Image (tube, rainbow, N blue to C red):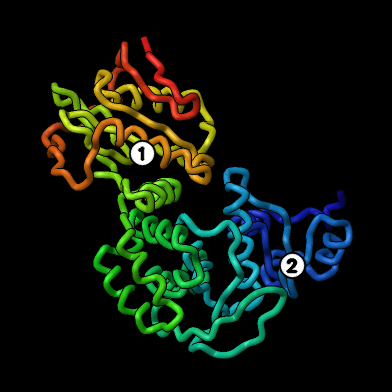
Amino acid sequence: MSSREVVPPQLLGLAQRQGGLVSAEQCEALGVGPSRRRNLVARGAWHRVTRGVFDTGATPADVHPHDAARLRAVWSTLLANRRAIAVGTCALMLHGVRGLPRRLDPESALPRGAAGRARDGATLRQYVTRAETVRIHGREVVEAELALVQALPTLSRDDAVASLDSALHQGLIEPTQLVTIRRRLRRRRDSLKVIPWLALVDGRAESPPESHARLRLHDAGIAPDDLQRDFFDSAGRFLGRADMVWHLGGGRWLIVEIDSQEFHGTDRQVEHDAVRQNGLLGEGRNIILRFFPTHLTTGDIVDRVAKILTREKWRPRRPLPPPLTTAVPAGPAPFLAATAVVDDLAGTAVVNG
């Protein structure tokens, strides 16, 4: 490859933050002129996305393919017009909200709601954003609250609740802002369907799969008694924090753990999960079900939880014993021998030790 075909590292670094995309203006600033861009496209190294926007294929290895595709949608519209403001789901993506659909429609707006020409699949909204914008990666992005108001009517219920859970969990919005969001949604005729969904939001959910699992169980009439509950042993040692729990009486609990990814990357993570799970078992008094996101679409989680709750004669809305609050978490609990765990994949009780 000749020196004229080498892409400056600064430009590739910029592309990595922009879903692999760069603008002609950014190329010019870093010395990649029209002839070099045409050559890169001609030999297939780059691809033209829309006028003045190029796909370099330079996405970080640690970014999930779904997130890379979402970022590409966001930047394909922002780079096409230097005045463009990220709105709706594209704005939520730049804020770091999780739980968005795998496929985002590129959408942006111009200052003061000005009209403009959209092209190549992008949507240009005539939103009047006033002063409700912040700068992220050097671009104007509507604030998280307004972005949610714009995006929620376009989402399914599950994606809407997961996105709101994520925004709350990350502190992008405060719980009191749900009242404002409700008020703003009521002003939009296309948003009335969203109002009942707000009652299902819970910022304690730590991942979209947890949100989706909670909704499945809610729909089946067996919503969890508590979320993210801390467990301690009789000596006050911290044993772990459970994603979703149901109190079975007599100090016994059904615990459901939702893995946010199906495969763990390191032995250290696998070991940590095993120690944590054995701690939560409470010397055999508790029951643990562990699910991966792929199990949420099969109905297995509802069937398994319902079967146990029926067997244990669980009743909803019973007063819960208060969690211990005086102990300070002191690291992972030791491995507990002779404990039983329900393996949701095999459907059998597995005895450790």
Residue name at image x 29 percent, y 45 percent? 224
Q: Quadrant location of the C terminus?
A: top left
Other residues around mark 2 within 10 Å, as few (<14) / some (14–19) / many (≥20): some
Residue name at image x 88 percent, y 57 percent? 43
Rendered image quadrant of residue 271: top left
In-front residue for pair 143/287: 287
Residue 57: % across, % down:
72, 54
In-front residue for pair 201/50: 201
Residue type of the residue flagged with mark 1: Ala
* Above or below: residue 274 compared with residue 68: above
Q: In this rendering, would 119 be left or right of 85? A: right
- State which tag comes first along the sequence, 2 or 1: 2
Other residues around mark 1 within 10 Å, as few (<14) / some (14–19) / many (≥20): some
Residue 79: % across, % down:
64, 71
Residue type of the residue flagged with mark 2: Val
* Above or below: residue 344 compared with residue 335: below
Q: In this rendering, would 242 be left or right of 132? A: left
* Above or below: residue 159 compared with residue 247: below
Label 2, on which residue? 49
In-front residue for pair 222/340: 222
Q: CA distance from mark 2 to mark 1?
A: 49 Å
* Above or below: residue 281 compared with residue 263: above
SS for dot 2: strand
Label 1, on which residue? 306
Which one is closest to the eye, mark 2 or mark 1?
1
Whether pointer 2 and pointer 1 mark residues with C-beta atoms closer than 8 Å, the reply is no
Q: In this rendering, would 297 be left or right of 193? A: right
Q: In this rendering, would 162 be left or right of 312? A: right
Residue name at image x 59 percent, y 81 percent? 124
Residue 157: % across, % down:
44, 62
SS for dot 1: helix
Residue name at image x 60 percent, y 68 percent? 105
